[in-house]
Image: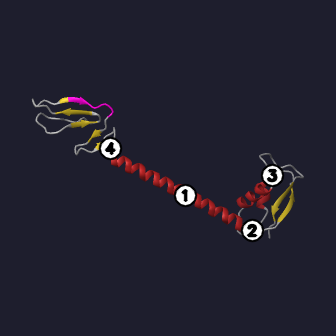
Amino acid sequence: METAKIYAGQAGYGCEGSLALKPQANGRPRLVVHEGGRGVDERGRGTTGHGLPLMASVSFFAVAVAVGMLLFVGGVLVQERRQAAFESTFADVSPASVTVQEGDSVWGIASRIDVDGADTAAVSRWIDAHNDLGAGPLQPGQSLVVPQGR
């Protein structure tokens, strides 16, 4: 941290945070502490405790909030678009039934189903959404609703 240097005979106040050197009639500066006050730069503008101009801090905060809002809105729009694409991919698909075999997984079953415009991850999400699977493993003999492929 740099300290402000005030020389005898210098006009005005020298400030560093809430400390100020006040010129006296005898030419010797006197230290004055402003409790709870903001610092003032050489032009008399308010500063933060770190010497950054107050308007720069406020402007930075406003820009950060605006960027955050744009990212949030963009994320919501992307998610809505993905959901619409997912729904349109499976709009004309008829459900079918599959019996789970030993060693089957949702991913393995989904990889064997060919739906136009859908990858294995999308088919797997469709199977999860249309069956009450929970977190447990699939059981042999269990019946699953799956999208009917080509």
Whether tag 4 and tag 3 are in contact, CB under 8 A, the answer is: no
Give the residues drawn in magenta, as a range.
31-36
Q: Nearer the viewer, residue 136 or 28?
A: 28
Distance from Cα at disc 4 to Cα at disc 3: 57 Å
Relative to 120, 104 lies left or right: right
110 versus 49 height, above or below: below
Q: Looking at the image, which residue sits at the far right?
A: 141
Disc 1 to disc 4, how far (Cα)?
A: 31 Å
Task: List x then y, in percent, for residue 120.
Answer: 73, 60
Which residue, given by chain and number where applicable, does mark 3 sit on?
132
Q: Earlier in the sequence, mark 3 or mark 1?
A: 1
The type of residue carrying mark 1 is Val
- Look at 33% across and 33% down and name the residue there: 36
Q: Which residue is mark 1?
A: 73
Task: Assess whether mark 3 and mark 2 are in contact (beta carbons under 8 angstroms).
Answer: no
Q: Are marks 3 and 1 in contact (CB under 8 Å)?
A: no
The residue type indicated by label 4 comes to: Leu
Q: How many marks?
A: 4
Residue at the spot of label 2: 91
Q: Residues within 10 Å of mark 4 (few under 14, many from 20)?
A: some
Q: Position of residue 84 (x, y in %)?
A: 66, 65
Q: Quadrant of residue 100?
A: bottom right
* Identity, as a three-letter code, of the amino acid under mark 2: Ala
Going from N to C along the chain, the mark reached first, 2 or 3, is 2
- Mark 3, other Cα within 10 Å: few <14 / some 14–19 / many ≥20: few
